Amino acid sequence: MSSVAREFVTKAKADWVTARREAAATQDYNPDAVCFHAQQCVEKLMKALLIFHGQKAPKTHDLFELDRLLVLADASWKSDPLDLQVLVPAAVDYRYPGVSATKIEAELAFAAAERVRRVAGPFLVKFGESI
């Protein structure tokens, strides 16, 4: 199996740990970080799955494009577009001045990422990985 795909999975796990830790923070809580790391976890899992399916992982943050490519690679892939939509602003918007995530947006992003992780889990198992 591809070492690049496995590294994507490792990095996705690290992003999830960071999102989870920040989501539970009682001091210096940073909703931008929750959103960003939740989105990054999903993006990296999707890219890993593309590679495991013998596809290229494009250099994009566009979860809808990654989702489209995953469906082409494996018709049984089914993520919820609403979950992807919640995560879209987290890729770039919240990293720069002028836009900040709220606690509610962070909670929604975290929950959306958890649902996509659950969808990805069985696919990853087929390739000897887990989340």
Image (tube, rainbow, N blue to C red):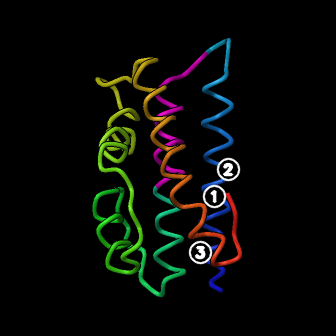
Quarter of the image for the C terminus: give it: bottom right
Distance, label 3 to label 1, CA atoms, is: 10 Å
The range drawn in magenta is: 29-42
Between discs 3 and 2, the one toward the N terminus:
3
The CA span between labels 1 and 2 is 5 Å
The disc labelled 2 sits on which kind of residue? Answer: Ala
Residue under the image location 42 percent in, 84 percent down: 55
Residue 12 in the image: state x and y as whole percent: 60, 55
Circle 1 is placed at which residue position? 11
Dot 3 lies on which element? Answer: helix
Q: Residue at x 50, y 79 (%)?
A: 51
Residue 96 occupies quadrant: top left
What is the x, y in percent for residue 104? 42, 19
Are the residues tagged 3 and 2 within 8 Å (C-beta)?
no
- Disc 2 is placed on an element classified as helix
Quarter-of-image position of residue 122: bottom right
Of 94 and 76, nearer the camera is 76
Residue at 34%, 38% (x, y): give it: 86
- Residues under labels 3 and 2: Cα distance? 14 Å
Q: Looking at the picture, how far across and down is residue 2, in whole percent?
A: 62, 84
Callouts 1 and 2 close, C-beta under 8 Å: yes
At label 1, the amino acid type is Lys
Q: Which residue is mark 3?
A: 5
